[in-house]
Image: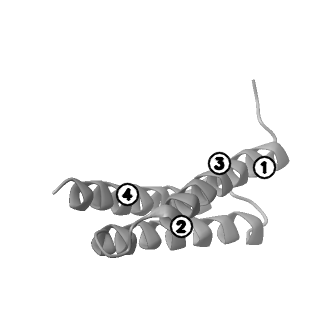
Amino acid sequence: MKLDEGSLRFTVATLLATSAAAIAVYLWNIDLVNGQRVFGAMLGSELVIFSMLVYVYSKPSISGKQSTWLLLGCFVAAVFLLISIQVGVS
């Protein structure tokens, strides 16, 4: 199955928007007194995901060499999420 540029852009944007919404709901319900460090790491991940969403919609093409920035953004967001999990457990 070959994805064209429009459907690929829509799929990536939908995944990013869904993850951003899930993190926003979690941040809304977090206890700020006990989870301040988790809040910071999750907010960092939220901002990286938002910037990737803006990147997907601002670039005319997300295939080729430009996809390196998208993959790097996904990696940074994953690192922030892993940091928030590690901080939340300890």
Q: Secondary structure at mark 2?
A: helix
Residue lying furthest top: 1
**Identity of the residue drawn at 63% across and 58% down:** 21
User: Which badge, 1 or 4, comes first in the chain's sequence?
Assistant: 1
The residue beneath circle 4 is: 81
Q: Secondary structure at mark 1?
A: helix
Q: Quadrant of the C terminus?
A: bottom left
The label nearer to you, 3 versus 2, is 2
User: x%, y% of residue 80?
Assistant: 36, 63
**Identity of the residue drawn at 81% across and 41% down:** 4
Amino acid at pointer 3: Leu
Residue 24 to residue 19: above or below: below
CA separation in Å, label 2 and label 1: 26 Å
Q: How is the image coloured?
A: one colour
What is the number of the mark on residue 28?
A: 2
Amino acid at pointer 2: Trp
What is the number of the mark on residue 52?
A: none
Mark 2: few, some, or many residues within 10 Å (few <14, many ≥20)? few
The residue beneath circle 1 is: 10
Residue 22 occupies which quadrant of the picture? bottom right
User: Which badge, 4 or 3, comes first in the chain's sequence?
Assistant: 3
The residue beneath circle 3 is: 15
CA separation in Å, label 1 and label 4: 23 Å
**Dots 3 and 2: beta carbons under 8 Å?**
no
Amino acid at pointer 1: Phe
Closer to the camera in the image, 17 or 89: 89
User: x%, y% of residue 73?
Assistant: 48, 63
The label nearer to you, 2 versus 1, is 2
